[in-house]
Image: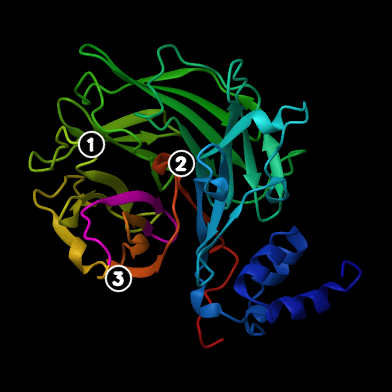
Amino acid sequence: MASLPLDVLLEIAARSDPVTLVRFAATCRAVRRRVADPTFWRRLRLRHSDRFVPSLLRGHLMMAYKDRSFSNVELQFVDTTTPDATARPVTADDGFLHRTDGKTSMRRQDHVASRDGLLLVWSSNNRPPYDSDLCVCDPATRRSQPLPAEPMFRNEVARTLWQPYVLLVGDGESDAAGGVGQPFQVLKTNLALSPNHRFLKIHIFSSDTGMWGPYVEIQAPDLHGSRLLKGEEKPLVVDGSVHWLCVTDKGNYVLKLQVGEAKVVVTELPATFPRPMKMYRDLEYLLVTTSPSCGSLMVLVAGRRKISAWVQEKQTGKWKEEAQDVIENDDIPREKTRHHTFDVWLHWFAERSCIVLIEMKGYGFFLLDIRSMKIVNRYETWSMYAANDHPYEMHLSSWVPTFSGTL
């Protein structure tokens, strides 16, 4: 197949399916230029193109029990483009680095961030010495880039309360030797909270330099409180800035980090915003947006009756005093013959496709489109750690056309 002329390969790809075309276009620059050519778009005759959007949401990654064994945990990829949302183990063939020191089977791998087709994977030994490391992987091209030893912060907040890693992916391509083909940054962050001091700690790794940058400390005096009440809240990236939802013992806040300026802006949610009770997971929170580039911020709140959205006004930056209803739990389409449940979990938000993964215990997973506020898909699988669930989507809008069912 490699000996075929490029024109012949393009003809084959034009009659394949969206996933095959994406993989084909990810192979090299020459192919991407030809795929981006408008004359190629007119030749497309793709199969299953009605399931394709420019920001291709392929599925999600999760930790699951292997063969239903409670002592054997593995990383799995759930392909939501298939009718039955097939789950399969993630292996070295997907670009995940494996240790060659004979201790691979003793190491645990967690995906801790994902963005624009790249995954950040953290691994460590299951027992001391933990010897943890990070690498960035591209499952489409099966390329990986290991990171040098990560810096450590003093008095780090437990990962159960703060998601420390943020993966930022730049535009264009990178020629760095041994890289994944795209420029990226990895932010390691930590939030320091005490009655007298509130600040964000940051180290940034750049794929351009191949090094971790210096320690940066940014004050956040408008963030009040001495501890976080809710954990596992995933950061949201909008227009290059990173946002965190911070529910503290004193209030409810959204912390915005402007990475290039090393500046933190804190906005307080209204007093009417619901706060967690002592009951475990009585409320679920998720920070989302209507557009990855210039959309309004929203905080989804899932309770025992419904999911609501608290919206920030784009022009003023102020949060609306009242929430808008998104969907009643009883209106989520499911098999009514099963047992009744009130447990609704918000697992993740796919920033490019504006999709939220919802889990209703006992009924499966549902995909909620933030733009239409409607459930667009449902499937059944089971994850082990909600904090380790992440979407996998590929950002192709700069060079892949929008496909429709008429092609």
Q: Secondary structure at mark 1?
A: loop
* Tag 2 residue: 388
Task: Say which quarter of the image contains residue 256.
Answer: top left
Q: Is residue 55 left or right of residue 379?
A: right
Q: Is residue 403 magenta?
A: no
Q: Identity of the amino acid at label 1?
A: Tyr
Quarter of the figure that contains the C terminus: bottom right
Q: Position of residue 187 (x, y in %)?
A: 50, 31
Disc on res. 335: 3
Q: Identity of the amino acid at label 2?
A: Asn
- Give the residues drawn in magenta, as a range: 338-356
Residue positioned 66% across, 70% down in the render? 21
* Tag 1 residue: 280
Q: Is residue 86 above or below residue 386?
A: below
Residue nearer the viewer, 150 or 132: 132
Task: Say which quarter of the image contains residue 220.
Answer: top left
Q: Identity of the amino acid at label 3?
A: Glu
Mark with earlier residue (3, 2): 3
Q: CA distance from mark 2 to mark 1?
A: 18 Å
Quarter of the figure that contains the N terminus: bottom right
Q: Position of residue 311 (x, y in %)?
A: 20, 52
Q: Is residue 41 above or below residue 248?
A: below
Residue nearer the viewer, 43 or 92: 92
Q: Secondary structure at mark 2?
A: helix
Q: Which dot, 3 or 2, sits closer to the camera? A: 3
- Marks 1 and 3 close (CB-CB < 8 Å): no
